[in-house]
Image (cartoon, grey):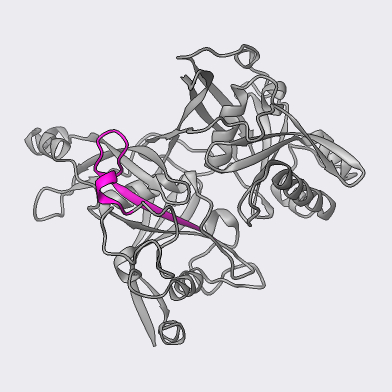
């Protein structure tokens, strides 16, 4: 016997994830929730294929999230069965604040592949685009002004509007705004907004085009995790320079040439992800750098955080530098949005590894309040860009917000099947 739970499966940026509704999960134990997610994704799988579930065998394709509007009927925050995340995520009074409120709560979880691991403490910037799309399609986000605007427009003009969707990332309490193109749902019995899928935006690593979703993420604290543009990490008898940047998820940037040299590897920052993944000496050293950086900066170590990113120069005319990002033990086939955000911030901070290796003349200047600093990086599937807005925060001139574009697409809408025995065993 199996039980069927309402779900959407979506691509967001260069990631894919399973979205679950909170109603089916609110009144069961947290242990049961976690077993449901593991079973739905096909984890654990010793062969790394997630053959018995929705997962795709690598970190970017092994993600899940629970979405809900604030004020939902959930166990209290001090309950052992409370949903993971900041204790006030479901506070309807705070959520309704015009300036600092939010429309939907995004409870992301990184799902292990080979091992039954769930990391609720990280986030996924790529999947934010799909979270916004799904929240609109599930009618969790309401905007009467935009709805009336489209109702009153001439239908022959195929009117669209941009719906700013405020998403609370429950892991860290940041409110991210995703600006989603919407239309009236032609299949709905009454006027209802639905996210637009088609468009002309191109994302490297994703075939075809889609509707552009512009994502704005605040940077509430100074991005330099240690306060230093560079930190020296000790790895056994060796040292390696790093820049540790945190714009929502900490990333340790290291010069690729130095790391490959320490590993006695013939690979370079332009080598393929498959080739680098197969180089055990490199991947072992990357993990040692990750552990050393976490200890040095006081970052709690989990499977998804901190991340490591190898940085090198480029001779391409369409990029400022080349990177190979590491995510949950593998070289990412593109770039995680959280890493891209940290890269853009680092490019705007004098003295960082990223700023020093960039070929852009714009990155040699110290930015001023009001400036927008942009960065384009080359990754295994092409290029990706992001920008940071420079502001004066508590008397310090620094990056205050990140802006980047993603696309998203609904891949299936229906139910995900999980064994009934899970509910009996963990009840």
Location of the N terminus by quadrant is: bottom left
Residue at 63% x, 47% y is: 332
Residue at 41% x, 70% y is: 81
How far across and down, in percent of the image, does residue 221 sit? 52, 33
How far across and down, in percent of the image, does residue 55 sit? 52, 64
Location of the C terminus by quadrant is: bottom left
Q: Is residue 302 above or below residue 231?
A: below
How far across and down, in percent of the image, does residue 412 sit? 36, 61
Residue at 88% x, 41% y is: 262
How far across and down, in percent of the image, does residue 153 sit? 10, 33
Horizontal placement of 297 versus 425: left or right? right
Magenta segment boundaries in residue numbering: 90-110
Task: Inspect this view and state whether residue 390 appears.
Answer: no
Q: Is residue 203 above or below residue 48?
A: above
Residue at 75% x, 41% y is: 271
Q: Is residue 108 magenta?
A: yes
Q: Quadrant of residue 214?
A: top left
Count every numbered label the image shows and give the total: 0
Residue situated in front as seen by the camera: 91 or 183: 91
Residue situated in front as seen by the camera: 207 or 197: 197
Q: Quadrant of residue 238?
A: top right
Horizontal placement of 408 versus 306: left or right? left
């Amino acid at each position: 016997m199996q039980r069927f739970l309402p779900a959407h499966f979506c691509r967001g940026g260069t990631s894919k994830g399973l979205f679950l509704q909170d109603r089916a999960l609110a009144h069961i134990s947290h242990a049961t929730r976690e077993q449901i997610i593991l079973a739905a994704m096909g984890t654990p799988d010793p062969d790394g294929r997630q053959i018995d579930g929705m997962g795709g065998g690598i970190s970017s394709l092994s993600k899940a999230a629970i979405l809900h509007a604030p004020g939902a009927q959930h166990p209290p925050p001090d309950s052992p069965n409370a949903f993971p995340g900041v204790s006030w995520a479901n506070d309807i009074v705070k959520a309704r604040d015009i300036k600092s409120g939010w429309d939907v709560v995004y409870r992301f979880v990184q799902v292990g592949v080979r091992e039954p691991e769930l990391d609720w403490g990280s986030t996924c910037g790529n999947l934010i685009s799909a979270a916004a799309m799904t929240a609109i399609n599930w009618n969790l986000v309401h905007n009467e002004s935009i709805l009336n605007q489209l109702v009153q427009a001439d239908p022959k003009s195929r009117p669209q509007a941009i719906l700013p969707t405020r998403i609370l990332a429950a892991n860290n309490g940041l409110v991210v705004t995703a600006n989603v193109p919407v239309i009236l749902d032609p299949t709905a019995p009454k006027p209802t907004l639905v996210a637009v899928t088609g468009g002309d935006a191109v994302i490297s690593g994703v075939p075809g085009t889609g509707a552009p979703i512009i994502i704005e993420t605040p940077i509430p604290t100074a991005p330099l995790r240690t306060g230093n543009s560079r930190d020296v990490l000790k790895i056994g008898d060796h040292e390696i320079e790093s820049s540790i940047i945190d714009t929502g998820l900490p990333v340790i940037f290291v010069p690729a040439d130095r790391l490959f040299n320490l590993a006695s590897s013939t690979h370079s920052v332009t080598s393929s992800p498959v080739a680098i993944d197969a180089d055990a000496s490199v991947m072992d050293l990357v993990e040692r750098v990750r552990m050393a950086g976490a200890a040095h900066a006081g970052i709690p170590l989990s499977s998804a955080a901190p991340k490591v990113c190898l940085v090198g120069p480029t001779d391409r005319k369409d990029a400022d530098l080349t990177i190979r990002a590491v995510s949950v033990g593998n070289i990412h086939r593109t770039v995680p949005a959280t890493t891209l955000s940290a890269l853009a911030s680092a490019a705007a901070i004098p003295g960082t590894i990223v700023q020093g290796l960039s070929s852009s003349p714009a990155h040699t200047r110290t930015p001023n309040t009001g400036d927008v600093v942009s960065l384009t990086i080359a990754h295994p599937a092409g290029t990706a860009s992001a920008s940071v807005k420079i502001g004066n925060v508590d008397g310090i001139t620094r990056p205050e917000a990140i802006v980047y574009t993603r696309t998203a697409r609904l891949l299936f809408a229906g139910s995900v099947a999980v064994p009934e025995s899970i509910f009996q065993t963990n009840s």
